[in-house]
Image (cartoon, rainbow, N blue to C red):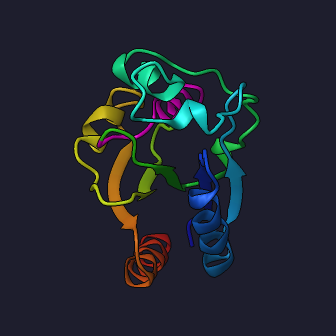
Amino acid sequence: MSKLLIAYFSASGTTAKAAKLLSQLTNADIYEIKPQISYTKDDLNWMDKKSRSSIEMSDKSFRPALKDKDANIEAYDIIALGFPIWWYIAPNIINTFLESYDFSGKTVVLFATSGGSGFGKTVFGLKNSVSVDTKIIEGKIINSKNSFNELVQQLKSICK
């Protein structure tokens, strides 16, 4: 059986709740991706073009600094990577995380929380942040109990 890590970034707590429950239901280890500087409510105001998140997401090459780089990625075969959807893609800090470790030969299953949008071009936006032999799988948008249960089953199936 493959070893599974649930790694997640959560700015407001929504993705954290999903990741913690996912970790419990799959018996997986968990790792929180933390920015060096936490996001405030004002930072996350997508209606304000001068908010921190709006500025960061307008520049696809911007990489927010991580608080630490102590995820033990080499110990896992499969990483379920969770985040909120920002502007129809993963927040840039997810690229920072992927570029900070060697994911060669690993499978990364994405899951996200969103108020209404889908994955959009998320997989495409993350491919250049990992080696070519890293498999990125579009998992589920967690917006219902049904989608959450489907993700749990997907991960259990991949880990067999």
Of 117 and 26, nearer the camera is 117
Q: Quadrant of residue 73?
A: top right
Is 147 displayed left or right of 42 in the figure? Answer: left
**In the depicted view, which residue is nearer to us: 148 or 42?**
42
Snapshot quadrant of residue 36: top right
- The residue located at (69%, 48%) in the rendering is 32
97 inside magenta stretch: yes
Q: Is residue 118 above or below residue 35?
A: below
In this view of the protein, which residue sits in the foreground, 113 or 154? 113
Can residue 3 be seen in this snapshot? no
> Where 67 falls versus 76 (above or below)?
above
Q: Which stretch did the figure color magenta?
A: 88-102
Q: Considering only vertical position in the picture, is 105 above or below 63?
A: below
- Residue 112, quarter of picture: bottom left
Note whether residue 34 is visible.
Answer: yes
Q: Is residue 58 above or below residue 47?
A: above
Q: x, y (%) of residue 85?
A: 40, 47
Q: Is residue 103 magenta?
A: no
Query: Which residue is found at the position 45% from the left and 18% from the top?
Result: 50
- Give the tally of numbered discs: 0
Quadrant where the N terminus lies? bottom right
Residue 18, image x and y in percent? 58, 67
Looking at the image, residue 118 sits to the left or right of residue 2; the answer is left
At x 69%, y 37%, the residue is 34
Residue sitting nearer the eye, 49 or 118: 49
Q: Position of residue 126 (x, y in %)?
A: 36, 35
